[in-house]
Amino acid sequence: MATVELDKINKLYDNGFHAVHDLSINVDDGEFLVLVGPSGCGKSTALRMVAGLEDISTGELRIGGKRVNDVDPQGRDIAMVFQSYALYPHMSVADNMAYGLKLRHMPKDKINERVTKAADMLELTALLDRKPAQLSGGQRQRVAMGRSIVREPQVFLMDEPLSNLDAKLRVQMRAEISAVVRSLNTTTLYVTHDQTEAMTMGDRMAVLKAGILQQLGSPGECYDTPNNIFVAQFVGSPPMNLVTAKINQAGEGLELEFGGSKLAIPASVLADRPALKSYAGRTVALGVRSEDMEDASLRRNETGSTIKGTVNLTEALGSEIIVHFTFPGQAVVTADTKLVAEDAGGEELHVGVDKGVRWVASFAPRSRVRMGDDIEILVDVERVHYFDAETSEAIRG
Amino acid sequence: MTVTTEAAPPRHSADEKLKAERMPFGRWMRLVGWRHVVAVIMVAWALFPALYIISLSLSGGNTLTSACPPDRSGLAALSCLVPNKIDFSNYSTLLSSDQYPFVTWMKNSLILATGSATGALLMGAAAAYAFSRMRFTGRRMGMLSLMLVQMFPAVLAITAVYLLLTRILDVFPAFGLGHIWGTLLIYLGTALGVNTFLMKGYFDTIPVDLDESARIDGAGHARIFFDLIMRLALPILVVVFFVSFQSTFNELPIASVTLSDSQNTTTAVGLASLVSNPLIQEWGLMAAGGVMMAVPLFTLFLFTQKSLVTGLTAGAVKG
């Protein structure tokens, strides 16, 4: 068990591609840290540098306080789970798990003991004599985990270990990996492009974009106080709803104007974020999480803070109703929103450009809204997020 | 609405379908049958010399026509492909002859073929591993020149090889002209190019993740090479071994220059010498020797044919 310190790590390829910029992360002993970001953000490169599979261009990497920049992968006492599992096809499950220990000249009985223990833990005992080709995806995944566990390394590295599994299995393995890693209490770096995995598995998550660290914090922090529009959109499902809004002076306070609606900014928010005052008369990017909206007809006693929209689509999930609605307004289109939309499959890119803004809200299941309804939506103005329209940074302090 | 037939077909429909699909002979011939005809012709074409040699070797005679009595002519002569008598005298003569040391020839051929196949395999695989897995200056140039060099047949260098081996004879007689070790070196040189390419193509299909996983497990290059690559690339290794074995075993032009002494030469050169003298042409012995020469190759093929098929197609598609 050990800490992992990345100190201003850079990766510059020979062709000039700068994959990782000044990445500094301290992973605590026993911590589960998730590196998350869209494809091509440098998260895998960062992990491979920690593993020793890629050279570090500049910066320092310390494992357990010791500089390991020039140490071979085998000397770093790490174990890695690959996206493809990388099981040795010609070896049995037991041999796959034992291979690393054999190379380290561990006595046979001790190898057996560890393999048996790990196989027990991962319910692989019945499969020990099989070859990888005879296993299902989930079983292969468990063997790959087992191969790492038997090594009892200082650090686990996992490179998108679940992305080759189908959705249902992924949820199950997600829980299993979490449970196993926590019971071993080994420092873990986990790379994924799936923010759900990052949210559910990590003690902390590091959100990367184009090789630059955007935010490092607990999943809750990243979700509730995103540093910028990118994090706000990338973390959380559905992504945070955004709209371009104008901040107007309204008597003593400020109010937001967008899409024909006006929302007063509560005094408590202004006290929290005095910087907002300097934005009076300017436009900002306004962000609202889907769960911070409610069907206004369900809350008749609360007034104000509502916007009007037309329902495009409802998805009743039982516990909630997901409502897609449109209202006239100006969508926030930046490089970040495009990137997130592309990463999600590119479908949301065009929506809203001519038909106004499309938002997704989650209503209580009692709501009776139907497709095509014109409805009023109550917005929890205390929990609205503000971003600078030019820099995309969150407006705080 | 008549959707029921698709949803619930009657029980006996499968039989009826089968009957319906049995096509008339003309159509079958046009679509499938002609391939059988072509195949039969090809097999006859390929088997003719083999059968002829076997028949001749068993005839006990020593001329090209001894397998066939003169009274059979025209199409009837084709029946001579089936041996009309079983006489092993050609075999026994060849095996016991002092003038034609067939056993020495076979020994030399086997040493040369095994040695050059093994060497080509190991060196080619090592080179292919480097080309496939490592990035170094001159990698591209190295591969290009390898490809360029292998386009020229080895026989082109025969004069140079002759001179080279003559000089080496003065310093290291064992590796000089007229000794099999010198010839082995020449064979090794000629075998590398194609094989390296074939193997590199196959190695490229083995995921690099495996290497990386092994590196993290604590394996160095040698371990990765022998524990992983050589094990996973077995089909292509079998192909390379077989191809170099058979080409060396049958090789004539180089050996006939470097091993020209008929007392210490390869089977191919030795057998050729049986019929190269216009005054004494031992066709019967030649045929018997040819049949015996085919035995090692035939055996090797039987043992490796399964890997040969997978290896050759894999190499073909991915290489």
Image (cartoon, coloured by chain):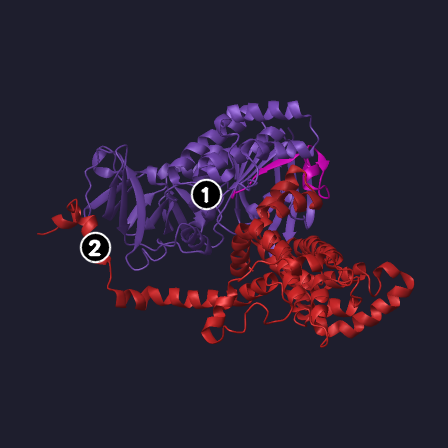
Chain colours: A purple, B red
Q: Secondary structure at mark 1?
A: loop
- Quarter of the figure that contains the N terminus of chain A: top right
Q: Amino acid at mark 1?
A: Asn
Tell me where residue B110 appears, x and y as whole percent. Answer: 71, 55
Q: Are marks 2 and 1 in contact (CB under 8 Å)?
A: no
Q: Nearer the viewer, residue B120 or A389?
A: B120
Can residue B283 be seen here? The reply is: yes
Please report the bounds of the magenta region as a residue range: A62-84
Mark 2: few/some/many CA within 10 Å (<14, 14-19, 20+):
few
Residue B50 position in % (x across, y down): 55, 64
- Protein chain holding label 2: B
**Amino acid tagged 2:** Lys
Looking at the picture, how far across and down is residue B292, in whole percent? 64, 57
Same subunit: marks 2 and 1? no
What residue is pinned by disc 2? B19
Q: Is residue A59 magenta?
A: no
Up the image or down, A268 lies above or below A57; here it is above
